[in-house]
Structures are given as structure tokens and as C-alpha cells.
Amino acid sequence: MASVAELKEKHAAATASVNSLRERLRQRRETLLDTDVARYSKSQGRAPVSFNPTDLVCCRTLQGHSGKVYSLDWTPEKNWIVSASQDGRLIVWNALTSQKTHAIKLHCPWVMTCAFAPNGQSVACGGLDSACSIFNLNSQADRDGNMPVSRILTGHKGYVSSCQYVPDQETRLITSSGDQTCVLWDVTTGQRISIFGGEFPSGHTADVQSVSINSSNTNMFVSGSCDTTVRLWDIRIASRAVRTYHGHEGDVNSVKFFPDGHRFGTGSDDGTCRLFDMRTGHQLQVYSREPDRNDNELPTVTSIAFSISGRLLFAGYSNGDCYVWDTLLAEVVLNLGNLQNSHDGRISCLGMSSDGSALCTGSWDKNLKIWAFSGQRKIV
């Protein structure tokens, strides 16, 4: 029997070998990739998106939470938004009127994520209780105004960091967790259909922070993790990741598929957003900003979203900035953090309405804001 010291030595040697091969692979890829999206677009004479401060304006501020806003989601069809907050409540808003349609008090106040079902009739949420709770918005509240939980999905061994319904499937939901796994659930039965990662060697090696399902092919989804990688999964083959994407140097906090379903974007603690090609595994572009003048540190990227065409990438930062990037030229065309009525705190979440006409941002300042495109720029 090998001693513990010998096993540790072998493990260290194997890890060093893997890291060496990974570095050689990265260098080889760099020699083959002689350009990126921005350099190629500029060489083709592409002009940046012309964007004025009046093209995207804050038309509504949604006030009602008494704690930091951590997560938000739009309904696929109607103009409703659900938000989750440190105050232990989910609030469902009418985005057109700013009215609250539901205020749901949660059994566990430590909520981190929320999502609408495709039909807009249910909402899901999860957090430090390691469970995902489902609420039917048509349920009757009790005498105290509390809404009953229609289903609790239990099985994770760590906090639930994000959740998303499979598009056009009310009974399928994917969660990510601090236990280093993602899970596909049957909402009707409350049972786990598949577990991605965990005991399998191709899974994440640290907390999983975010998931995004490919709306063009709902069998595929990506997950971003504190192990600095993104992994692509096929829900039909849970035993191994289809591909692993490297490039970030910090926690991957947010992943989002590009509208065409062939690419996806990421946002990280390393202060950058990146665009990856799903099929080839290549990193197509890095969207990096300058450090803050005050402390010379790079603000972390907390959340990202694409415009309906994919030409714009919205990125929320820990210092309250919300950059609008031109995805082709990797240039910042607008910073919502510099506009009138901007947030007064960390941008924790953001999301684009299904028709592409408005962006919603959530912040640690306890508010949500709806930004509307004006004039001919209604849908970019």
C-alpha cells in the first residue's frame, strides 16, 4: 500500500503534468489563432455602433425591496419581472406599470437566484438552504398573506446559485450549486433526472455559479464555475462534459448564450467578459476594461446579457458600472453607470426582455431599473 505522502506526491506530479500540457495547448492555440473578432471586424472596415446617452434611458425604478437585489428574470411572453432579494422576498413586477403583482415571503431568506417558468405561471428560487422552491402564482395566499410552496427540489449538498427552466418545458429545470454540480429536475415529481459533475472526472472542481441553456438546442447548456472554467453539457449524456473552456483567471460568475446558439459569453472576477465558440472551443474575444482610478483594482463582472441581435453585450460590474459593449469591435459604447438615475451600488444582476426592447438591472442599492431603447433603436 502506498503511503499518504506518496499518494500526495503522485497527485502533485500529475497536477503539474496536466498544467504543463494545458499551457502548451494554450500556446499552440494562440499560434493558430492569429486574430480575434475585433481585429478582423476592424480590418473589414466595420464601424462601431453609434450610441448616444439618450438612446438607452432609465424609464422606471422598481422600489419595494428592503435588502440587496441578488437576481432577476423576465417572463418569456409578458412584461413581468421577478426579483430575489436579501430581504427574503420574491417580488413579481409589472414592468409597464411598476406595480407589484406578488410579494412572496420565503421560508429561507438567504435567496440567491430566481427564474420564471416558460408560461409565466410559476417562479423558482434557490439559495443557502440548498433547495430550489417552486411557487405557483395562481395559488391562494394564507391569512398572513404568505404563498404556499408548490414543490421543493432537494438533493444538492451546497447552496443553489442559479436556476433556469428549460425553454418551452414547464416541467424541466436546471440548477447549479456550490456542491460543484448541476442538476436537471422533473418539477412535477421533484425528482432529479440527471446530475452533471460531482463524481465524474470531467465535472467542475469548485462551486458552480451560473448556467445558461441554449434556446436553439435545449439539449445543450453551459455552466460557469469558481474553478475559472466553463463547461458545455448535453442533458442526454450526464456522465461527462462535452467540452471545457479555459481563459478566465478568476471565478466565472455569469454565462449567457449568444442569440444564434453557436457562441456564448462569460463574465468573471478577473474583470473581463469573453466570447467563446461553442463548437471549436476557441476564445473569440476578450472584453477588458481599465482598472478603477481610485484603487487601481479591476471591478469584477457580476452579470451579462446580450441584445436580441447579439451586437451589444451588457455587463454589470461590482463598482456600479454597467457597460454596453460592441461585441464586434470590443469597444464600450455606453456606461449606464454614468447616466442620470443610475444605480448607487454594485450591479448584481441584469436581463433583457424577450422582445429586446428593454434591459432590467438589479443592484445592492435595493432597486431595480428598467432601461428602454428610444426611437429607432427600440430593438438592437
Image (cartoon, rainbow, N blue to C red):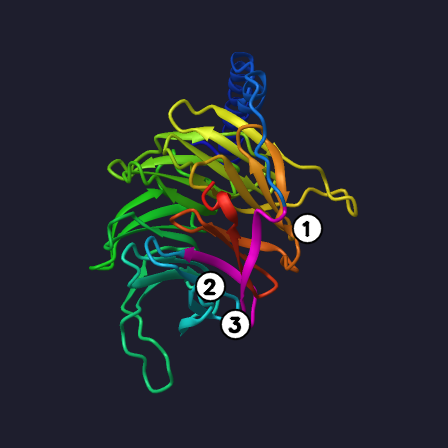
**Image disc number at residue 81:** none
Camera-nearest label, 3 or 2? 3
Q: Is residue 35 above or below residue 369?
A: above
Camera-nearest label, 1 or 3? 1
* Callout 2 crowding tier (Cα within 10 Å): few <14, some 14–19, many ≥20: many
Q: Is residue 152 above or below residue 277?
A: below
Q: Is residue 201 visible?
A: no
Identified by mark 2, the residue type is: Ala
Identified by mark 1, the residue type is: Asn
What residue is shown with label 3?
A: 64
CA–CA distance between discs 2 and 1? Answer: 25 Å
Which quadrant holds residue 44?
Answer: top right
How far from the left and from the top, in percent, is residue 148? 31, 75
Q: Residue at x 51, y 59 (%)?
A: 70
Marks 3 and 2 close (CB-CB < 8 Å): no
Camera-nearest label, 2 or 1? 1
Identified by mark 3, the residue type is: Gly
**Does the segment drawn in magenta span residue 149?**
no
Q: Which residues are magenta?
A: 53-73
Q: Is residue 172 visible?
A: yes
CA–CA distance between discs 3 and 2? Answer: 11 Å
How far from the left and from the top, in percent, is residue 153? 30, 60
**Image disc number at residue 338:** 1
Which quadrant holds residue 51?
Answer: top right
**Image disc number at residue 84:** 2
The residue lying toward the viewer, choosing from 3 and 279, is: 279
* Callout 1 crowding tier (Cα within 10 Å): few <14, some 14–19, many ≥20: some
CA–CA distance between discs 1 and 3? Answer: 24 Å
How far from the left and from the top, in percent, is residue 235? 27, 40
SS under mark 3: loop
